[in-house]
Structure formats: structure tokens, C-alpha cells
């Protein structure tokens, strides 16, 4: 079984591009397992406890759409969520689930934008110890 980690943000088109890539892997329906990951950032501890129960990846539209696309393609899918630093969580989850590859959704950003705001994609590529695939927005 070939296992991939598919970290998605809240952009539906990017998540679908990632899902399309995974569904198009050779014999995906029989041999691929996808773990769709959404990382909540910010101070979750500041939320009231009765609101925290609704903080679930399955409530995020991009996650639901990617999951639905993969399931319709016959790919085994798990949905996971995490909280904290996006890059660290992606790397840690890749290790925890012993994935064969990480499939990220890329977006166009100027060099200055990357320098000022950083780039999750760039950081994952530089810090991952396994293959990282970056899909385009229109993949």
C-alpha cells in the first residue's frame, strides 16, 4: 500500500488539485491510501470549550471536497486534523503515519512574498525526509 499525506488549507481548488494528483497515481483505487490533513493555526485555547467541539477538519469545505473526490475515485481516505505550527505538524504527521510521500498544493507567490511571509511549501520541501510533490492550482 502506497500511503500519501495530503495537507490541505482552506482553498477548495488547491485541495481538489491535490486530490486529482493522488487519484491519478497508478492503480490508486487498489494501492493508495490518502491521509487528508488540515492544520488549525492560532490560539485554540482561547476558544470556549463548547465551541472547540466544532473544531474538526471534516467541517472544512476543502477537506470535505478532497475527501469526496478521492472516495469517488476509489481511494482509501482518512481525515486528520492537528493544531499548531503547520510545517512542524506536516513533518510530524508524515513521520507518525509513515507516509511514502507528501502531496502539497502550491500557489503562485512572488519572491518578495515568500521572503516576507515565508512559505509552508518551501519549508516542507526543505525539511521533509521523504518525497514531496507540489501540485499547481490548475493541476
Image (spheres, rainbow, N blue to C red):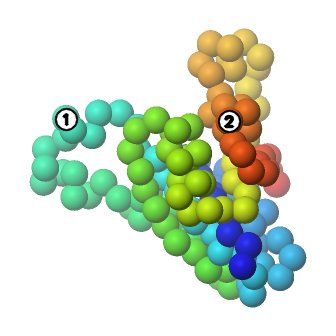
Earlier sequence position, callout 1 versus callout 2? 1
**Residue at position x 38%, y 45% in the image:** 83
Q: Is residue 12 left or right of residue 134?
A: left
In the rendered view, does 115 fall on the left or right side of 95? Answer: right
Q: Secondary structure at mark 2?
A: helix
Q: The N terminus lies in which quarter of the figure?
A: bottom right
In this rendering, is residue 82 above or below 42?
Answer: below
Residue at the location (69% across, 20% down)?
Answer: 114
Tell me the quarter of the picture where residue 35 sits. Answer: bottom right
Is residue 45 something one can see in this rendering? yes
Residue 11 sits above or below residue 30 on the image: above
| Residue occupying the point 49% across, 67% down | 79
Name the spot of residue 90 as percent of width and height, x first. 56, 47
Cβ atoms at labels 1 and 2 below 8 Å apart: no
Check residue 80 in the rendering and tell me which mark sits there, or answer none. Answer: none
Q: Nearer the viewer, residue 1 or 121?
A: 1
Please provide percent x and percent y for residue 18: 71, 58
- Mark 2 is surrounded, within 10 Å at the Cα level, by few (under 14), some (14 to 19) or many (20 or more) other residues, namely few
Tell me where residue 105 appears, x and y as whole percent. 70, 47
- Nearest the camera: 74 or 13? 74
Q: Is residue 121 visible?
A: no
What residue does disc 2 label? 127
Query: Which residue, as the protein is rendered here, is positioned at the far right?
Result: 26
Alpha carbon distance from label 1 to label 2: 30 Å
- Residue at 73% from the left image edge and 38% from the top image edge: 125
Q: Nearer the viewer, residue 74 or 78?
A: 78
Disc 1 target residue: 46
- Percent from the top left, x then y, of residue 49? 13, 49
Q: Residues within 10 Å of mark 1 (few under 14, many from 20)?
A: few
Depth check, mark 1 against mark 2: the one in front is 2
State the SS at label 1: helix
Amino acid at each position: 500500500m502506497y500511503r500519501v499525506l495530503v495537507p490541505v488549507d482552506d482553498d477548495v481548488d488547491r485541495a481538489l488539485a491535490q486530490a486529482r494528483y493522488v487519484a491519478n497515481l497508478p492503480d490508486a483505487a487498489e494501492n493508495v491510501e490518502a491521509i487528508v490533513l488540515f492544520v488549525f493555526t492560532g490560539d485554540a485555547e482561547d476558544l470556549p470549550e463548547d465551541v472547540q467541539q466544532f473544531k474538526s477538519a471534516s467541517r472544512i469545505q476543502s477537506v470535505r471536497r478532497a475527501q469526496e473526490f478521492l472516495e469517488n475515485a476509489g481511494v482509501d481516505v482518512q481525515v486528520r486534523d492537528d493544531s499548531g505550527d503547520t510545517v512542524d505538524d506536516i513533518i510530524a504527521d508524515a513521520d507518525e503515519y509513515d507516509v511514502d510521500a507528501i502531496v502539497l498544493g502550491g500557489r503562485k507567490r512572488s519572491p518578495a512574498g515568500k521572503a516576507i511571509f515565508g512559505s509552508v511549501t518551501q519549508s516542507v520541501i526543505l525539511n521533509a525526509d521523504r518525497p514531496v510533490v507540489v501540485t499547481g492550482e490548475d493541476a
